[in-house]
Image (cartoon, rainbow, N blue to C red):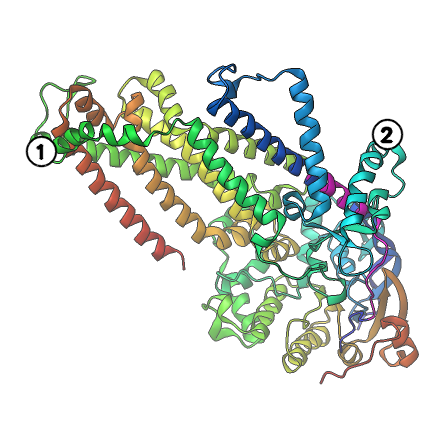
Amino acid sequence: MDAEPHGSTRRESLSHHEIRALLKRRVFSFVLDWAVWGYVAYAVVFFLNHYWFTWIPAHWYDTLALPSWGWALTIAATLELTVILRSSGRSLGMRAFGLDLRPSSGERIPVGRRVLRILCWQLSVPLALVGFWARPSRPWHDRLAGATLISTKAESAEDAGGDPAGGPIRGPEKRALATQWGIMSLFLFGLTFWLGWLIVEANLSTLASRASKAGDLFQEIARPDFRYFFTEDPIFVLRRGTYSILDLMVLTLFMTLLSTFLGTVFAFPLSFLGARNLMGKSPIGLVVYTVVRGFFNIFRAIETLLWATIFAVWVGWGSPFAGVLALTIHTVAALGKLFSEQVEGIESGPLEAVRASGGNFLQIIRYAVIPQVMPAYWAFTLYRWDINVRMSTVIALVGAGGIGTLLFYYKNEGEWSVVGAVVIAIVVVVWAMDYLSGWLREKVVR
Amino acid sequence: MAQAEHLVIDRLTKVYERGQVVALKDLSFSVKKGEFLVVIGLSGSGKSTLLRCVNRLIEPTAGSIRLDGVELTRLSVSNMRRVRRGMGMIFQHFNLVKRSTVLTNVLAGRLGYTPTWRSMVGWFSKRDHEMAMANLERVGLVEKAHVRADELSGGQQQRVGIARALMQQPTLLLVDEPVSALDPATSNSIMQYFEQVNREDGVTVLTSLHFLSLARRFGTRILALKDGGMVFDGLPGEIDNAWFKEIYGEDAEEVEVR
């Protein structure tokens, strides 16, 4: 027997909640459109300056060199452009927030009506802002133009399924480049590339004319000198010891193994405390969740190189222990976040079942969460090991030990052929570890 | 069969904070020991919320729930966990850990009785293991004990769910839409397990069902919910066509499931 309500018709009037959600999206999409035009205005001033004017400082993009009337003009012009384009078609902001302007009756909104909407907007919105918004679901610049701003996406999963009459409203599919938002996206793409090219001072002719200098370097590197591969270089002294390339390579591998292991050990328990679905049930849980997630985000945002700098000062320049600490801290934060997100994606059913049978928090984690996340945890850990291997070769730059110490030492000495040997050693190891971790990952994700 | 009041629900109300949705309003009824009580109603009428309020997987907004005279709504978290041990729950989507073996899933029903440190290392007692095999025997899945749960069919998974609930040695089974995800033939055999547990072990069964035909066949008493309120409380035979329309709406038509 199927007792689903079939007779439910599409609701004509929106609920209070829906109106607010729609209004919010309307405002956000407007802000986005306006910001896009602000960006275009920025580009225009930049191009004017770059190609013609000289009265603005050369690096003007970090100064605000516009007269006050120029600012006023820019703001007004971008605002009007935004309004005009939002009335004449589906703007990028409308597309991004799932909105569209549809005629209240008939197939399309005639041009005259669109112009009317632009004109009405000038009065309607300022009035609305001081509190005369009669019907926020359909302000009167829409009503007079015979148009409605509607949502093109389902509000929730419940709406997305169910009866077709109540589902999301879709217009006829158009090719992206035949729409306003499509053209705008392409335009912004091109504009950004052009602007970026000028800002980073890209220069292809220098790249070509000075190629011979790099060529000399490559020739040296291409004749690698493996003199110090097995035997220690007597001149290179690090913390009262002498090392061969192989010595430091082995040491570097142990650095990565230790830091990946330690990082995982700390990230594992923290990941459950940083998962909203486990912690979001009580106020205390939410506090713990916020703190743990905050820790992950902040410590992850600080790059391994920065941590290495700190620890090199702390435990000594060139000490591999500094490198281990730096890699560990970043591993905890990065893995913790990945793990937590994995926990947040699990099925809630088994959790409910363990809870219903009288299980406590730890038992829920052990019997409902861990079995679900284990393969992903393994995969992430191996992936992180991979990253640590690559990272460990460069942190020596700031004094955190490892194979990179040799690399930068010989670079500074100008012994490019030994540099070549070190580089080859690094490449071989990174490639081998990459292959090994990939192979292991495939084995565990079953 | 003893006729004592096992579960007494009084003016139970659940309001979801967001959007002010009233899922249950002022529901009062009591369940005698050994009853097979079926709750019917449309999707969204509050059946699942009702069942989950009984073991407080969902916190009720107001009202009282008494199990053998103990007020559940005011119990502390740890006391509630102890009470939950005596209430088995069966789920619409089985809620097994798919990557774990059938045996591990069944043993998980014993977690409420197992000290935390022992459960962390997965060290269940010999008695628990014997009990797990006995319950698997009962649902006819002994030979699947060491198979991963996701290798089983839907009906088999639900039988594992039953074995897991029986591990708790419950006095009350809360059964939430047990056969909605199953085909009609399997549905009937699954329902027969509940009937057996109810008759032979004297376990009180409180189940929600989608199909009225199944409710009529297995229930000793039927409750009907509509928009969170009770519209019918009586014997299966009393639901005639007029009641049916009242519960499911004018447009609904009854479909037989055999």
Separation of marks 1 and 2 at Cα, in angstroms = 78 Å
Task: Name the element at disc 1.
Answer: helix
**Highlighted magenta segment, given as a residue range:** A7-28
The residue under the point 71% across, 28% down is: A76
Neighbor class of circle 1 (other Cα within 10 Å; few <14, some 14-19, many 20+) is some
Q: Quadrant of the N terminus of chain A?
A: bottom right
| Residue underneath mark 2 | A130
| Residue underneath mark 1 | A226
Q: Position of residue A399 (x, y in %)?
A: 29, 21
The residue under the point 36% across, 39% down is: A261
Q: Earlier in the sequence, mark 1 or mark 2?
A: 2
Amino acid, disc 1: Phe
Q: How many marks?
A: 2
Q: Is residue A65 above or below residue B45?
A: above
Relative to the observer, which residue lies in front, B26 or B143? Answer: B26
Relative to the observer, which residue lies in front, A180 or A345? Answer: A180
Task: Name the element at disc 2.
Answer: helix
Q: Position of residue B51 (x, y in %)?
A: 75, 60
Q: Is residue A192 above or below residue B85?
A: above
Q: Can you name the residue that lies furthest to the front here?
A: A52
Amino acid, disc 2: Val
Q: Is residue A307 magenta?
A: no
Q: Position of residue A60 (x, y in %)?
A: 51, 18
